[in-house]
């Protein structure tokens, strides 16, 4: 079953969005739809289930396939979500790197340097982050303001395809594909317009 | 009558000259005139900065009210207007289009600007390490952002440059413009071409902003939007406006009150008009003298001028009231009997004010010169011109009956002179108890700018970050490049402190624009294309990056090797250029100064001793703690004024000793003055008012004015004639007018004026009462064998 919904185009987007896109993907992974019968499985159903937030931790392994490099580069680490609005991506290998979205801020830590960005400074990123939160809150309408969303498959093997509505974002990210099965997010694939892509596989860890 | 004609002729010519001088005078109002003229290097630098430096040219513009979108639109419109305005050197409001131009320039010149560019970075090992780092970055969340840079910049020099330049705190932006942290105010940072002390130019710049704002808010349709302006220039304009307003108001009020008093006393409009002639002449001569002597006239000097009404009017009061019943004022008898006393009073005042004149502080010296010239001219006009102006049958109401009543009051008081002693002792005790909090150590107490405006300024500054530079290091060079090289030398010392965690970092102009020598050294460490290509191939052997992907890098390096060094012109019109404005500038002496701002370690304070030690042998570096330096500057100034006041007091004592030829008499004349000074100072201490420099001037005025009273009482005690009652009446009238005019000054909102006014009004009253009590009693004591009162 396929559902495509469209809405008006968002306003603007800024650089830095890749991080947000990655986080969007990660967030999507946190969404854990409960088992549902195929006949009932559509976006509304999925998001109704996603609306039930709870803290979650997961391991991730991410491979980036770049035309620039002869082989993919790999990174791995942990993901964490604390409802209602704190998201963390902790890369452990090859270099420690932390990205946190907490309320109105994006906090970046790398090489002992810490940088705080205000979401309010970057309306484009804000649109992305708010759409993430909308997703977590099961607010499909808000997500649809930023992306066109397509849902393929059924509850045992589904795939969300998000395409940014903003033209300036599409040069950075062509689409985000989130694959999952039942309550599990399995993969998040970010595909750029030039064909470079990153594939993140997620394996849930126990809640700490 | 020939000498009278000469006097009148001189007077008219003098008046004309004064008026001509005043119409050509330049009036200023910045408080830096009240800073020392010959401070230490660090202080001179600060004073220069406060008065004319880059810091003085910053204007912060806040836009409040309406809604965020309207504020942003107004901000953009105002910025467009100011960019086109020749009065402004630069305007920043956050609409930087993402610093695209700056990024482009930094990328183009990355090999001259990156601190990482060294010979070892371009060896096989160095290249391998740098490129491996970049490949790791590609794996990170930022990977997708930086990947497009890799072919041209595989060693990550642009990121190194950006990282180095990243400010501690960038202003927050919303809707594309700078806003306050709460988002309720749009903020623009403008730099005027004129210095902060050029008040006329600053006023024009402010008018430009106001016009642009009015136009913008009208076209946006945001009638409820409000404009807030702060910064040194805006404050100078505000100060001047406040001073002019207060001076006008106070001069009018003071004149009205004194005129009413004199009219009630004289019951003759002609006497009133004539009585004010010496005052007006004195004021005009004072302003003219200051204009000639200093080139400019400070607004505070004009405000102080109103106090002269209170003192100079005394002379004509003496002339009119002391005249004998059946004789014209100014007759030979008055000249012989009273003029010497008036003259001695004028001389003691001059002695007191000389302290101000010689204080070495331009603002105070102006007050001193103004007072001395004003009083001398007022007294001379009273003595030589006024009698000639009087109508032939000029008489005023006889104030002898009032004088007789006052004589009885004075004698009553004289029997209770112990009260003065008790008050003086109590005052001394109060002063001793409050000795630690007696003096106000802060310069801010002189600032006429209201607290609310200063708070707004601090808020705006905090909002835009970067400007909160309490700790700075200043280095000089004979050229801009020399200053940059010196800043680099200091930077190398500071790097060690940063590594030790003693500093969070620093902002140096040499980071934005390295010295030519440093740039040449960096570019010289770039290998030739063929050499580089060979080394890159070796460095990339074990990596997923293929050497052919970084051919653009090899091409860029080849271009960079032969490129001319980056100069200030390279960055012209960019945010980097504007940042350099505040950090690298020529000084008044033709040298160049580089300013390095220090950032405190997180959660800690700057270890000044460690920093000072680290940079002590780095050329001519001076560590400045702006906040305490300004206060220290003022403390030194206050101390100096205290010393000069003491010298002035000593001069008065010497003068009286010479004139009166009797230490005992001098002691009696000085006793009421000393008591008045102590009681007024004690009163301030008791009410919790900390004494500033201005209170000190007020006390000096008390001595100057009070000495007239004491000398007249002294004269009455020694020359006992029928004039005593009239003399006393004249003193009472003079005192009431003095107290009234200073009392009005104490209502001023300008600290400089209200401190002086309040102190002098109370002091003058005390001086008269104490003189009456202490010096009148003299009469009984002087008579050998007479009854002790």
Image: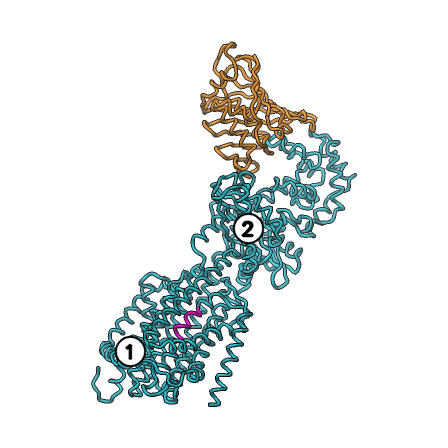
- In the figure, A182 relative to B533: above or below? above
**Position of B696 compared to B517: left or right?**
left
Residue span colored magenta: B304-315
- In the figure, A194 relative to B576: above or below? above
Q: Nearer the viewer, mark 2 or mark 1?
A: 2
Q: Quick one: B421 or B297, which is closer to the camera?
A: B297
Look at the image and tell me in which quarter the N terminus of chain A lies: top right
State the separation of the CA atoms marked 2 and 1: 60 Å
As drawn, the label of residue B772 is: 1
Chain of the residue under the numbered disc 1 shown in the image: B
Viewer can see residue B583: yes
Q: Residues within 10 Å of mark 2 (few under 14, many from 20)?
A: some
Look at the image and tell me in which quarter the C terminus of chain A lies: top left
Q: Position of residue B689 (x, y in %)?
A: 35, 62
Q: Residues within 10 Å of mark 1 (few under 14, many from 20)?
A: many
Q: Quick one: B239 or B527, which is closer to the camera?
A: B239
The secondary structure that dominates the magenta segment is helix
- In the figure, A189 relative to B723: above or below? above
As drawn, the label of residue B211 is: 2
Magenta region includes residue B497: no
Q: Position of residue A4 (x, y in %)?
A: 57, 18
Colour that chain B carries in the picture: cyan
């Amino acid at each position: 079953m396929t559902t495509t919904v469209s809405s008006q185009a968002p306003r603007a987007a800024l650089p830095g969005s890749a991080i947000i896109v990655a986080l969007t993907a990660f967030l999507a992974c946190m969404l854990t739809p409960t088992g549902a019968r195929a006949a009932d499985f559509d976006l509304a159903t999925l998001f109704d289930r996603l609306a039930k937030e709870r803290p979650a931790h997961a391991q991730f392994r991410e491979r980036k396939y770049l035309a620039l490099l002869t082989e993919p580069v790999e990174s791995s680490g942990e993901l964490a979500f604390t409802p209602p609005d704190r998201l963390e991506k902790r890369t452990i290998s090859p270099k420690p790197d932390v990205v946190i979205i907490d309320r109105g801020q994006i906090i970046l830590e790398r090489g002992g340097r810490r940088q705080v960005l205000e979401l309010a400074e970057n309306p484009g990123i804000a649109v992305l982050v708010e759409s993430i939160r909308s997703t977590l809150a099961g607010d499909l309408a808000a997500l649809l303001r930023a992306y066109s969303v397509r849902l393929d498959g059924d509850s045992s093997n589904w795939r969300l395809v998000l395409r940014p509505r903003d033209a300036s974002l599409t040069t950075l990210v062509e689409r985000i594909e989130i694959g999952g099965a039942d309550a599990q997010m399995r993969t998040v694939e970010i595909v750029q317009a030039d064909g470079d892509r990153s594939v993140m596989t997620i394996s849930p860890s126990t809640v700490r | 009558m020939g000498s009278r004609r000469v006097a009148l002729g001189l007077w008219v010519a003098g008046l004309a000259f004064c008026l001509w001088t005043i119409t050509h005078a330049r009036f200023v109002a910045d408080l830096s005139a009240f800073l020392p003229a010959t401070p230490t290097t660090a202080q001179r630098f600060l004073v220069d900065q406060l008065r004319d430096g880059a810091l003085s040219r910053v204007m912060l513009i806040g836009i409040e009210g309406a809604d965020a979108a309207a504020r942003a639109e107004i901000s953009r419109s105002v910025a467009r207007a100011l960019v086109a305005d020749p009065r402004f050197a630069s305007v920043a409001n956050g609409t930087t289009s993402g610093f695209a131009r700056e990024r482009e320039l930094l990328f183009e010149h990355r090999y001259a600007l990156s601190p990482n560019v060294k010979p070892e970075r371009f060896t096989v090992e160095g290249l391998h390490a740098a490129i491996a780092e970049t490949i790791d970055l590609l794996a990170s969340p930022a990977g997708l952002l930086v990947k497009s840079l890799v072919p041209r910049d595989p060693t990550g020099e642009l990121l190194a440059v950006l990282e180095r330049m990243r400010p501690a705190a960038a202003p927050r932006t919303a809707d594309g413009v700078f806003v306050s942290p709460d988002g309720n105010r749009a903020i623009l940072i403008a730099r005027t071409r004129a210095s902060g002390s050029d008040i006329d130019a600053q006023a024009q710049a402010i008018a430009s902003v106001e016009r642009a704002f009015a136009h913008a808010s009208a076209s946006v349709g945001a009638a409820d939007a409000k404009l807030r302006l702060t910064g040194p220039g805006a404050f100078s304009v505000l100060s001047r406006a406040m001073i002019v307003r207060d001076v006008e108001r106070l001069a009018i009020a003071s004149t009205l009150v004194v005129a009413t008093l004199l009219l009630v006393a004289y019951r003759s409009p002609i006497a009133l008009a004539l009585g004010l002639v010496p005052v007006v002449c004195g004021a005009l001569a004072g302003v003219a003298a200051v204009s000639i002597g200093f080139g400019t006239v400070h607004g505070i000097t004009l405000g102080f001028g109103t106090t002269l009404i209170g003192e100079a009017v005394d002379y004509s009061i003496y002339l009119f009231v002391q005249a004998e019943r059946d004789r014209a004022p100014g007759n030979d008898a008055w000249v012989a009997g009273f003029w010497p006393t008036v003259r001695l009073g004028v001389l003691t005042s001059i002695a007191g004010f000389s302290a101000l004149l010689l204080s070495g502080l331009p603002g105070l010296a102006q007050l001193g010169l103004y007072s001395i010239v004003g009083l001398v001219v007022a007294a001379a006009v009273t003595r030589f011109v006024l009698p000639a102006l009087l109508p032939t049958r000029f008489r005023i109401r006889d104030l002898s009956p009032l004088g007789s009543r006052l004589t009885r009051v004075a004698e009553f008081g004289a029997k209770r002179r112990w009260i003065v002693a008790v008050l003086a002792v109590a005052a001394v005790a109060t002063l001793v108890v409050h000795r630690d909090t007696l003096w106000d150590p802060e310069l801010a107490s002189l600032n006429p700018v209201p607290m609310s405006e200063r708070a707004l300024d601090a808020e705006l500054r905090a909002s835009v970050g970067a400007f909160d530079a309490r700790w700075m290091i200043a280095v000089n060079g004979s050229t801009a490049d020399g200053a940059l090289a010196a800043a680099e030398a200091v930077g190398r010392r500071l790097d060690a402190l940063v590594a030790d965690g003693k500093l969070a970092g620093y902002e140096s102009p040499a980071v934005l624009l390295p010295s030519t020598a440093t740039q040449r050294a960096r570019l010289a460490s770039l290998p030739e294309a063929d050499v580089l290509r060979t080394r890159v191939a070796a460095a990339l052997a074990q990596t997923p990056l293929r050497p052919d992907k970084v051919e653009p890098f090899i091409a860029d390096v080849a271009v960079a090797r032969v490129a001319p060094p980056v100069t200030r012109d390279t960055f012209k019109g960019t945010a980097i250029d504007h940042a350099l404005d505040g950090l690298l500038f020529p000084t008044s002496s033709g040298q160049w100064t580089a300013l390095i701002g220090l950032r405190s370690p997180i959660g800690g304070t700057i270890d000044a001793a460690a920093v000072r030690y680290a940079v002590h042998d780095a050329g001519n570096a001076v560590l400045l703690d702006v906040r305490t330096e300004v206060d220290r500057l003022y403390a030194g100034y206050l101390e100096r004024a205290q010393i000069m006041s003491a010298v002035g007091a000593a001069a008065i004592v010497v003068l009286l000793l010479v004139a009166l030829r009797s230490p005992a008499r001098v002691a009696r004349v000085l006793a009421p003055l000393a008591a008045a000074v102590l009681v007024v100072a004690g009163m301030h201490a008791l009410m919790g008012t900390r004494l500033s420099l201005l209170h000190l001037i007020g006390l000096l005025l008390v001595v100057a004015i009070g000495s007239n009273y004491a000398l007249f009482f002294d004269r009455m005690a020694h020359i006992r004639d029928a004039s005593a009652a009239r003399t006393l009446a004249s003193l009472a009238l003079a005192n009431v007018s003095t107290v009234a005019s200073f009392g009005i000054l104490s209502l001023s909102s300008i600290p400089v004026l209200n401190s002086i006014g309040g102190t002098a009004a109370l002091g003058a009253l005390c001086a008269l009462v104490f003189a009456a009590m202490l010096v009148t009693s003299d009469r009984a004591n002087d008579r050998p064998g007479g009854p002790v009162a």
